[in-house]
Image: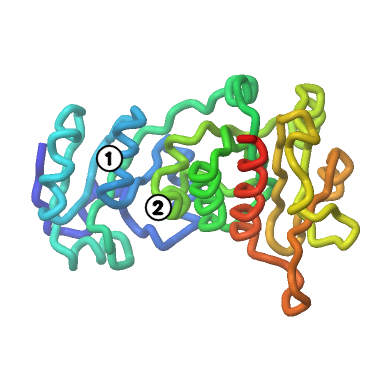
Amino acid sequence: MTIHVHDPHDPRLAPFTNLTDMQLRMRMEPAEGIFLAEGEKVILRALDAGFVPLSALMEAKWLPGLESQLAQHDCTVFLADEALLKSVTGYRLHRGALAAFVRKPLPSVPEVLEDAKFVVVLEDLVDHTNVGLIFRTAAALGADAVLVSPQCADPLYRRAVKVSMGAVLTTPWTRAQPWPWLLEDLGEQGFERVALTPAPSAVDLRGWSPAQAGGRVALLLGSEGPGLSDEVFARVDTQLRIPMTERVDSLNVAAAAAIACYVLAAGNAD
């Protein structure tokens, strides 16, 4: 069903209201069991991944590319002009379309790790943009799965979904619980637990290969600033560093993840 809307306070638009208020979204999306996909490509990827849409809000020009697939579900499509979209969401919607989807239950850790050889593990990242970028990198460079700590930013928060270009919807992932004791289980399952750190004592990333660890690798990444916790470092097998000039002391965690994934995934392919 398609409905033209003209009132930004229409209660039916509640899932799309005040998207710039991060605290509101963080409370609303997990609690109500929804997530938001932004842009035609990401919405289509969510549909292809089997997520069920509840409703959508978009400019009319985006409807032709989405209508046939949304029509396969009991999904109301609200059409509005650009001014109303901005009024509802609180910002200019560059990609012109939003859809609210039902979250799926997260798989268990054993399900996610069953056939995985290369896993990215995120501890307590607070920036949703970094989370989304790392998921996109992990998908692009051959990581099999992602584990996120209980306090890590939500991969299905709107910003993370958008920045990942839908990679969070297609990459196997789940919450790593119990944390950090799950890392001990990873070691018992044959994963070499590798931590990125700028410490001079760490091994040069360029000289290390997953083959040295028997093939299965878990790349551990911590939040910018504090990095990985002492509890995690106590459970690490190898510390790796990315060689850098003296002009900087560290890299953005998403940039570091891209470099490490490129090197480690290539090593796993050998």
Q: Residue 72 or 256: which is nearer the viewer?
A: 256
| Residue nearest the viewer, comparing 171 with 201 | 201
Label tally: 2
Q: Which amino acid does label 1 sit on?
A: Leu
Residue with the mark numbered 1: 44
Between 8 and 217, the residue placed more toward the observer is: 217
Quadrant of image for the N terminus: top left
Q: How far apart are marks 2 and 1 (CA)?
A: 12 Å
The residue drawn where x is 23% and y is 58% is 96
Q: Where is residue 124 in the image (x, y as percent from the top left)?
A: 68, 49
Give the image quarter of residue 147. top right
Helix, strand or loop under label 2: helix
In the image, what residue occupies the spot 51% across and 54% down? 133
Image quadrant where residue 66 sits: top left
Residue 177: give x, y in percent of width and height.
Answer: 69, 31
Residue 143: x and y, percent? Answer: 58, 38
Residue farthest toward the front in the current orientation of the protein: 270
Q: Is 75 left or right of 61, judged from the image as shown?
A: right
Residue receiving disc 2: 162
Circle 1 packing at 10 Å, graded few (<14), some (14-19), many (20+), is many
Q: State the quadrant of the C terminus.
A: top right
Q: Which residue type does callout 2 highlight?
A: Lys
Secondary element at tag 1: helix
